[in-house]
Image (cartoon, grey):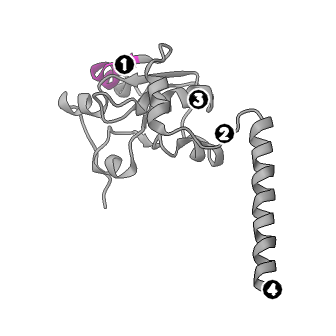
Amino acid sequence: MLARSTMINATMIVAASFGLAAARVQFEDGLMWFAPPVASSCALAENNPDLARVSARDLRDLLDNNSVALVDARAPDKYDEGHIPFAINLPADTAAETLQVQSLPIDKEQLVVTYCDGGSCAVSEYLGTMLRDEAGCREVHVLEGGFLAWSEANFPVEATPP
């Protein structure tokens, strides 16, 4: 009998919690039941005409002049295998959570360039939009062709030591 009573109480607590959560999501702006998957967010960002593009050659010149902050949107293992020198790693799939608990180690007034693997990868566009709209970076560009374009141009690449 005690087990049945405990089960009924637990069910009522779960139902009440769910009801309160549903009400909060329904009536508070900006809350969603589920975070949008990166792929669908990227699809939205891919059509974003506000994000300017920068070529690998132009990015190399900007890096030579120390006038850019570079953000790698790829997963940490990809970043560790090889990345553009001076890039920081801010994986797009965890960026929203990361930005809620820590600040960026870059000057928000500086030009920020994001990149991902390249090709049809829109992760850098998603991250660039987030850095501009949510983190307050004033000018954000995307590396056209991503890391692939950079490495195919035979520009320097660093790996993170094990």
Residue nearest the observer in this picture, 11 or 28: 11
C-alpha distance separating marks 4 and 1: 67 Å
Q: Mark 3 points at which residue?
A: 108
- Identify the element where label 4 is drawn: helix
- Residue shown at 76% from the left, 37% from the top: 26
Specify the quadrant of the image occupied by residue 59.
top left
Residue span colored magenta: 53-61
Along the polypeptide, which appears first: circle 1 or circle 3?
1
**Location of residue 110 in the rendering, given as x and y in whole percent from the top left corner:** 53, 25
Q: Name the residue under label 1.
A: 54
Three-letter code for the amino acid on which mark 3 is drawn:
Lys
Q: Callout 4: few (<14), some (14-19), or many (20+) C-alpha neighbours within 10 Å?
A: few
Quadrant in the picture for the N terminus:
bottom right
**Location of residue 3 in the rendering, given as x and y in whole percent from the top left corner:** 76, 84
- Identify the element where label 2 is drawn: loop
Along the polypeptide, which appears first: circle 2 or circle 3?
2
4 vs 1, front mark: 4
Q: Mark 4 points at which residue?
A: 2
**Location of residue 31 in the rendering, given as x and y in whole percent from the top left corner:** 70, 38
Tag 4–tag 1 contact (CB < 8 Å): no
- Residue shown at 18% from the left, 30% from the top: 152
C-alpha distance separating marks 1 and 3: 18 Å
Tag 2–tag 3 contact (CB < 8 Å): no
Q: With 157 as the anchor, is 51 left or right in this view?
A: right
- Identify the element where label 3 is drawn: loop
1 vs 2, front mark: 2
Residue nearest the observer in this picture, 17 or 154: 17
Mark linked to residue 32: 2
- Residue shown at 45% from the left, 18% from the top: 47
Find the residue positioned furthest to the bottom. Answer: 1
